[in-house]
Image (cartoon, grey):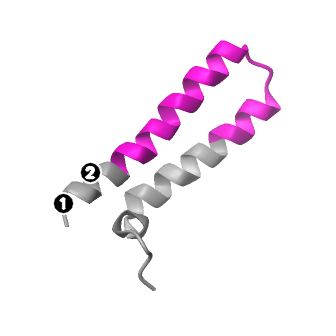
Amino acid sequence: MAQLFGHEDLDVYQAALQLVAWLESMFTEFSCSADLLSKLDKSTTGIVLKIAEGKGRRP
């Protein structure tokens, strides 16, 4: 079934979402500094957003 947004159908987008979910579980399992957690969160979220942005530029 087609998603509302085209990027949701991309395998790489789904893999990036899985990576973010896995890393979030690692963040909670291991104690890390708040600064490190913030940087990792921003970078992994950025991956997902860049994929969506790129798909938006190319139909």
Q: Is residue 23 above or below residue 34?
A: below
Q: Which residue is mark 2?
A: 54
| Residue at the farthest left position | 58
Label tally:
2
Helix, strand or loop at mark 1: loop
Q: Which residue is mark 1?
A: 58
* Amino acid at pointer 2: Gly
- Residue at screen point 53% across, 52% down: 17
Residue nearest the viewer, comparing 7 with 31? 7
- Residue at screen point 64% across, 48% down: 21
* Amino acid at pointer 1: Arg
x and y percent of residue 7 in the render?
37, 63
Q: Is residue 38 above or below residue 50?
A: above
Answer whether labels 1 and 2 touch (C-beta < 8 Å): yes
Q: Residues within 10 Å of mark 2 (few under 14, many from 20)?
A: few
The region drawn magenta spans 23-51
x and y percent of residue 24 in the render?
68, 39
| Residue at the farthest bottom position | 1
Judge from the rendering whether residue 54 lies leftward or rightward of residue 34; answer left or right: left
Q: Magenta stretch: dominant SS?
A: helix
x and y percent of residue 54 in the render?
26, 51
The answer to which quarter of the image holds residue 1 is bottom left
- 49 drawn magenta: yes
The answer to which quarter of the image holds residue 41 is top right
The answer to which quarter of the image holds residue 6 is bottom left
